[in-house]
Image: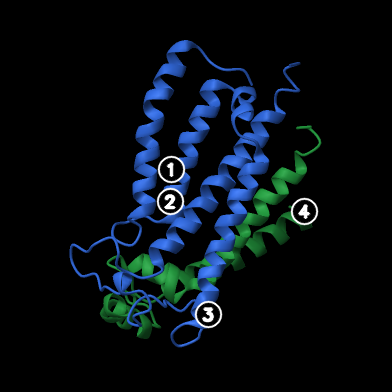
Amino acid sequence: MMGMSKIVKTIASIAFPLSMIYGLYVIAHGHLTPGGGFQGGAIVASACAMILVAFGSVWTMGKIKEKHLSVLESLGALGFIGLAFFGLIYGINIFFNNFLVNQNVIPIFNEIGKGLANINTAGVLPLMNFAVGLKVIAGLFAIVLVMAYATRLSEGK
Amino acid sequence: MSLRNIAAVVFFTIIAIFLIVGALLTHPFGYPENADMDQYIIDNTQSETGADNGVTSVVFDYRGFDTLGEATVLFTAVAGVIMLFRRLNK
């Protein structure tokens, strides 16, 4: 798939950082506002798909390969399940134990959020949101990128 | 009327009766039968998990296994698509 016209490329370049910031905001504030890792990851993956449509799959594949996206996705999965396994070590020793809240492992994260809460509340929930967000971003963008790069064969390129 | 049409009418009537009776027998909207757990979560989600968003605390803490399954489904889908298009993208 080749790139589109210069107008589309310019508008996509302007709109890309704004939607990226919005998606990362939804991921980072997943434990405070509606949203979370899955939703924010879908927003960021949509922004990356917009760049893919505007600039073409050959150009995008020159920037990032799907191997690197696979590594990022595996890192997200390992972080998520690793945080779940840390609950076996600290605290009351159960799987998916929220070991940073009410147990004073790391004092800065040991804060209860009520009302307009800070971002360092909720223990492992923001970290799990980051892991799931990384996983969703890399996974969805890898799917779109691989499928778009395969269509260049039918166009005789 | 052939035998096939008669069988279709009979089956349609039976299924329609089952659906109408089932729709009339449902309990009223907003009052689920098993409501023991949700009041506990509403009362204790801020003091136990520290999260301001109750939905996130349910998704990532109380029902963490469910999210683990969702993440596994996504991982399997991505692995399958990349494996399917591997030859084309050489």
Look at the numbered discs 1 and 2 and tell me whether their residues touch, using CB distance below 8 Å. yes
Q: Indicate the chain coloured blue by its letter.
A: A
Name the residue type under label 3. Answer: Phe
Q: Colour of chain B?
A: green
SS of the residue at dot 2? helix
Q: Residue furthest top?
A: A6
Tag 1 residue: A43
Same chain for marks 4 and 1? no
- Give the percent coordinates (x, y) of residue A150: 72, 30
**Quadrant of residue A144 within the rendered picture:** top right
Look at the numbered discs 4 and 3 and tell me whether their residues touch, using CB distance below 8 Å. no
Q: Against A136, is B28 above or below?
A: below
Q: Chain of mark 2?
A: A
For marks 3 and 2 on the same chain, the one whose residue lies earlier in the sequence: 2
Same chain for marks 4 and 2? no
Tag 3 residue: A95
Q: Residue furthest right?
A: B87
Circle 4 residues within 10 Å: few <14, some 14–19, many ≥20: few
Name the residue type under label 2. Answer: Gln
Figure quadrant of the C terminus of chain A: top right
SS of the residue at dot 4? loop
**Quadrant of residue B26 within the rendered picture:** bottom left
Tag 4 residue: B2
Please indicate, yes or no, whether residue B74 appears anywhere in the rendered image.
Answer: no
Circle 3 residues within 10 Å: few <14, some 14–19, many ≥20: some
Most foreground residue, A71 or B43? A71
Mark 4 to mark 2 CA distance (whole Å): 54 Å
Mark 4 to mark 3 CA distance (whole Å): 62 Å
Disc number for residue A39: 2
Mark 3 to mark 2 CA distance (whole Å): 25 Å
